Structures are given as structure tokens and as C-alpha cells.
Image: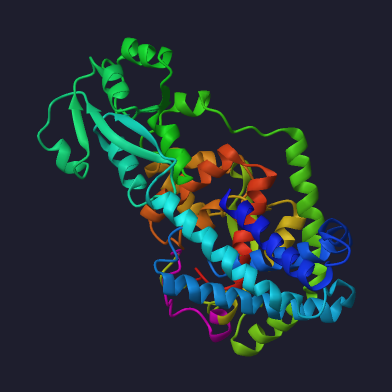
Amino acid sequence: MFVVGEGILIFLAVALASFFLLGGDIGIASMLEMIWLKVLLVSVVTQLSLYFNDLYEFKTTDSAVDLASRLIQSIGITSIALAIIYFLWPGMIIGRWIFFASLIFLLLFLVSWRLLYSLVITRKLFAENSIILGSGELAREIVHSLDGRNDLSYNISSLIAHDTNQDTKDQFGGTAVHYGFGNICNVAEAENAKTLIVALDEKRGILPYEELLKCKLRGINIIDGESFYERITGKLLVEKIIPSWLIFSDGFVKSKTSSVTKRLVGLVLSTSLLVLLSPLILLVALAIKLDSRGPVLFAQERVGQYGKIYTLYKFRSMRADAEKESGPVWASENDPRITRVGKVIRKLRIDELPQLWNVFKGDMSFVGPRPERPVFVEKLKKTIPYYNERFSVKPGVTGWAQIKYPYGASEKDALEKLKYDLYYIKNMSLVMDLIVIFHTAKTVLLGRGSR
């Protein structure tokens, strides 16, 4: 709602400026009929500039000064981008001075809209009271995930623990704690709680079926803790979910139509990009050859869909003998094995371009879990629950885990990334793929997260 609302305000700002400068005689409706496409172009470019300046990230703008700075940068980028578009496509010029007149309305609307949004989330004006049933690790993970996330519309009014425990209050930052499962509905109604989150680490023998049914019949929403955690974090808590939850939960739908569509899109895009980027590919290949000894391409076995082994291709960014002494190891930050050209192409993610050939062949998709080496897979399957499930889909050039979690080079990082990978597999769709690709484009253009 925030993003769409801001888009409408930007459109209105440009439309009003156009009306004052152009539409005085013909009326705003007739004027918009003639120039709506040009106004839409300005609106889209402006919102893209806001996005690339992290103004749609909830935790980025910590102060009014930072917000003002980012808004000014975004308007500057918008001006440059529109100047380039107008040079290439003169017919889209909206009118002399209209963009500059729009800035007055833009700043007024954007600042007012963001102040209103900030007021709404900081005071949690639309948050609904919720109660957590449980006081174990799952409950702590939920409370920790909600902490500081004012953009989430839940307010945990209290917890209900099964047994009396003096340490419980300290573990949950002073949140009110009730003990015993015999009076759940009355507590929920007294606190005007609309949602009851069942976050029990162990349900067998203690799940209060009768009380939960009574709450349900009184109109209180009941949701299991694992699903709630998935909703607010964008990942699955694999340490706590059981096979039956995976079996009976929504998601993991893979229709023939979506699979064929994803393959056709991958085939068309990979072919087009290989042709369009061929000059860049040749230039990078020459730079690698001149910079260090060894092959231009780096070929390595990876585990694909259903555990099938395939050969992944990348531009070589390390010395040819990088693993001669160490054996198979993950790359580390400021890895000394990386060459001079390697640092540049890793920073810009250009080393990933040869994977377009893997997408063309059908070994990979554009979006999916990142492929791992067989030696690491065998190790991780033994220690991380549900690790084998990530191979139910094709690996991707980019993925949900890559945009949500920084580069990982340890077993702990692999566990965290699996949580995001399983969330993607459970909820995968064309819209989600577009979100991942869009966010990846921003990451690449801003040079973030490479190693």
C-alpha cells in the first residue's frame, strides 16, 4: 500500500504541474488523455530511483537528514535518467519546465506521505494484539523477529506459558507472561487479542485442544508458530518444523504450466543475453587471459535438480591452482587466491555470465537455490535437516537466499540459506521470481554482497 500510494502521489504531482503549465484551457481530463503515458514514464523512473536509493527498505532511513539526502539523490538520478530517455526518444518529452515544476509537488507529497507512514508504523495504529502460546525456542525466535519491526502489523500483548518459570519474563524482554493453559480464551478477550500464535516446541501431550477450539469459535484467529514465523521472516525455521507440517502446509505446488513457462522464459532470456552481451563476454575473456595464467572459464561440478551432477561455468576469478594445497574450500572475504581482474568481475558479478549457458542448456534457471559442490552437499546433508529438499527444483543464477542473506562460507551460513531456499520452493511463482531478479539487479548495479 505504501509503494502503490506513493506511486499515485508521484503521478498526481506531475499531472498537477502539467495542468498548471499546459491544461488551463482544456481541462485536466482532456490534458491527461493526451499526456498520461508521459506522466506515467516520469512516475516509473522516479520510483525506480527511490528504489535504487534504498527508500523502500524499512530499516535504512534512520533520520530526517538521511531521508532528505536520499530523496535529493533520487530526484537527481531521475533528472539524469529522463534526460537520457528524452534524448533517445524526443516524443516522450512532456513539456518545457514541467519536471522542475513537478519537484515542488513531489517534495511536498513525498515528505508528507513518508511522515504519515512513519507515524502509522511507529505508533502501530493498525497493529492487532496477538498472544503467543508457548515460551520455548520457537516463541523466542518469533519475539526476536518481531523486535524492532514496526512495519509488521502485530503487537504481542502477552505470552502464555505451560509451566511457571521465573526466568520466562527475562527471556522475553519484559512482555507480560501468564501461566497455565486453562484460561486462554479469557486472557485473549481481556487483552482484545485477535490472533493466538501456537508456538509450542513440543505439542504432544500439552496442546490444549478444547481451549483452542473454544477460542476459534469465539472468532479468535489461530495460527501455528511455524507458519507465523514464515510469514514475518520470509524463511522456514527448519530446526523446529516436522515432516507432517511440510506435508500438510500450503505451498510446494509445481504445475506443468509453470514449469514449462519458467523453462521457456529461461531459454529466451539466456539466448538474448548471450547475444547482446557477447562483446562484454569477449572483453572479459581477453582481460582474464592477459591478467594470469590458466583457462578463461572455470568449470566445476555442481549438484542440480534431483541430485543430478552437472558442470557449472563461470569466468575464472582465482589462480588456476587455487585449491591445489587446500582442497575444496569456500571462498573467504578478501581471499588471496583472487586475481586482479577477478576482484573486478566478482564485484560486478560479471564472473557469473557464463552461467547463461547453463540456463540455455536447462541445467539451471535464472532463479532458484544456488548450486553447491557435491563434496559440500554430502557433508551438509548429514548435519542440516531437510537439506536434500532444496534439490527438488533447478538451481538458479540468483535466488531468494542470495537477496536475503549475505555471502556464506560456513555450515551455519548454509543452514540460514536453506531456510530461505525452502521458503522459495514452498512459495515459488513468477511474481516471486521477478522480485528476486529486480532485487538482484539493484545489488549488482550497486556492487553489494560480492566476495
Q: Is residue 249 magenta?
A: no
Left or right: residue 65 versus residue 89 is left
Percent position (x, y) of residue 184?
27, 19
Residue visible at 85% across and 60% down? 27
| Quarter where residue 182 is shown | top left
Given the current orientation, which residue lies at the most extreme left position? 166
- Magenta residues span 328-343
Q: Is residue 131 something that shows in the picture?
A: yes
Q: As displayed, is residue 82 above or below residue 366?
A: below
Query: Which of the two residues, 148 or 243, is positioned nearer the viewer here?
Result: 148
Q: As displayed, is residue 351 above or below residue 176?
A: below
Q: As displayed, is residue 98 above or below residue 249?
A: below
Left or right: residue 163 versus residue 66 is left
Query: Which of the two residues, 194 or 253, is positioned nearer the viewer here?
Result: 194
Residue visible at 12% across and 26% down? 164
Given the current orientation, which residue lies at the most extreme bottom position? 290
Q: Is residue 298 something that shows in the picture?
A: no
| Quarter where residue 32 is shown | bottom right
Percent position (x, y) of residue 11?
71, 61
Q: Principal SS element in the magenta part?
A: loop
